[in-house]
Image: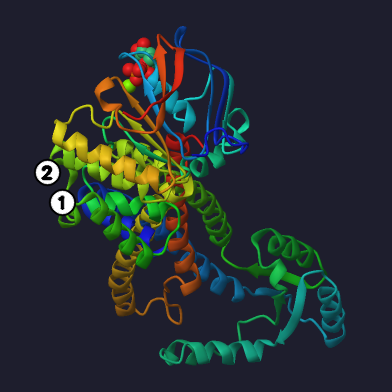
Amino acid sequence: MIRHFEKAVADIAANTFLNSITVITIAFSILIVSAFGLLMLNMSDFLNIWKSGIRVMVYLKENCNEQNRLKLEKAIRSVPGVSDLKWISKTEGLSRLKEQMKNQPSFLADLKDNPLPDAFEISLDPSHQHPDPISRIAAIVQKMERVDEVEYGQAWLGRFAGIIGLLQMAGYAFGGLFFMAGVFIVANTIRLVLYSKRDEIEIMRLIGATDGFISAPFFIQGSIQGAAGGLLGTGLLYLVFSFISLKVKGYEIVGPVSIRFFSPEILFGIIGSGVLAGLMGCYFSLRQFLKY
Amino acid sequence: MTHGSRKTPIIRMYHVYKLYDSKSALSDISLEIEENEFLFVTGASGAGKTTLLKLLYFGESATNGQVIIDGVNLLRIPKHQIPFLRRKFGIIFQDYKLIPSKTVFENLALVLEAAGHKRKFVEKKVKSVLRIVGLEEKQGALPPSLSGGEQQRIAIARAVIGDPKIILADEPTGNLDSGSAEIIFDLLNRFHKDGSTIILATHDPELIHSINGRKIVLDKGQLISDHKIKEA
Ligand SMILES: Nc1ncnc2c1ncn2[C@@H]1O[C@H](COP(=O)(O)OP(=O)(O)O)[C@@H](O)[C@H]1O
Ligand SMILES: [Mg+2]
């Protein structure tokens, strides 16, 4: 094994140019795909945060008495997907509003009457925190007696989720495509090396070397190329990421949300897929060349 | 001499034919070779000597007939067994077939590495084989920097380094001056005395002298003579 490893390293050293091209190509493939993946990761983070903040507000008509209110509460609770219900009286609503707008007290100070309606705030089961179920629940509640208006999350949320879904699909397709490109480029490099060593390989066979013995250094070479490409690609991505996350921290628009990099497990997986592409490229070239 | 004993011959060929495309290179060869024989395969250029050697180590496969090496019928040899068949042979090729980009040491070590030997053993063995062929000081040299006679001696060293049962030599003195040829021949004799089976192909009748051996003659792919050589 050490012997094969030494041979692989010697081969790489002997073909620096070809190997650099291969590693750089793999690195860029990985950079592009993982940049895309990282974007997905952070976008769905945002989406999740927004989702967990989804509340459905039910505003009641005026003059709703205690009895009607309890009846309504019971009815809403029985709608599937509703996990909790909170009563917010018009007085409470106003004090909340005042709290939220304490920087501009004058705006509310002039109010003589409380203009707000009584309301329920509905929390949803996580499984129902999607555009379709939300609008379904809203429609059911809207038809209930004493309900004036149902207000819920941003309509664009649905579109946003849809786009993320589409992008995710595109991401998988891209990933697959670039993986195949990686396999192809390694296969090509190894094919060139095999071709330049065809006499040597023929001699090795004549002196009793097995295909495994002949192939091992090439597999090692392919995995080194894949791993180096993976490290370089994710390293570059990390640089770009660090730069962007510095910029983002400057703007506090995102509040508690911060962007994040891949977990070590995912990084490991990305580099692993580089190695896998390297091994597969080798396998195809060797199979063709040695006809095993 | 094991010739004539009841031991199974190490090499057996029965009604072997070899066609290249539709051109006949060997036809109806039947031959048994005992362990520790010294066999000369002679005949004019193009008679089929090289082809006969190739059939033994499965460098080519017979078009028809049986080739049985040390109990293994090559007609039915699975692909993954071919390397192990080849380790029974030490082959001295007509064109040496040394790897020009590897040093003498590396060329020789490769045989043992391929057979899975440990580094320590490999180093020791390469040194001792180089000593036998008298080229210890050349272990760091690249083959193209050596003379023809030296390259041939390296080729011989590589052929014997794995302690093969059978040594095949294809025109081992063909391109050499008589002094170098003498050295090569003495080496082969020495390995024969140590128990190896030697098969030497040559078109040069001069080479066959002062040896207890056997000579076959090929002519246009046919075996036309097979007899013991009387010591001169
Ligand atoms: N690879 C090959 N393809 C086609 N014909 C070949 C090949 N090798 C040898 N031959 C032919 O087979 C015959 C025997 O060749 P060879 O065994 O090399 O003879 P020798 O070694 O006795 O000179 C010759 O006619 C030669 O031209
Ligand atoms: Mg010949």
Mark 1: which secondary structure? loop
Name the quadrant containing residue A228.
bottom left
Q: Which residue is mark 2?
A: B145
Residue at x-position 53% and y-position 58%: A160
Disc 1 under 8 Å from ligand 2? The reply is: no
Residue at x-position 48% and y-position 52%: A171
* Res A186 visible: no
Is A288 situated left or right of B67 in this image? Answer: left
Instruction: Return the x and y of residue A197 as percentages of the image width and height.
Output: 30, 40
Q: Which of the four quarters of the rendered structure image does ligand 1 lie in? A: top left
Residue at x-position 46% and y-position 82%: A256
Mark 2: which secondary structure? helix
Residue at x-position 17% and y-position 47%: B142
Name the quadrant containing residue A122.
bottom right
The tally of labels here is 2
Which of the chains bears the disc numbered 2?
B
Q: Can you say whether A194 is above or below A121 in the image?
A: above
Q: As rendered, which of A197 and B106 lies closer to the eye?
A: B106
Q: As rendered, which of B113 and A233 lies closer to the eye?
A: B113
Which circle marks residue B48 in the picture? none
Q: Which residue is mark 1?
A: B141
**Mark 2 belongs to which amino acid?**
Ser
Which of the chains bears the disc numbered 1?
B
**Mark 1 belongs to which amino acid?**
Ala
Instruction: Return the x and y of residue A276 as percentages of the image width and height.
Output: 47, 54
* Res B157 visible: yes
Instruction: Return the x and y of residue A25 as percentages of the image width and height.
Output: 31, 49
Disc 2 under 8 Å from ligand 2? The reply is: no
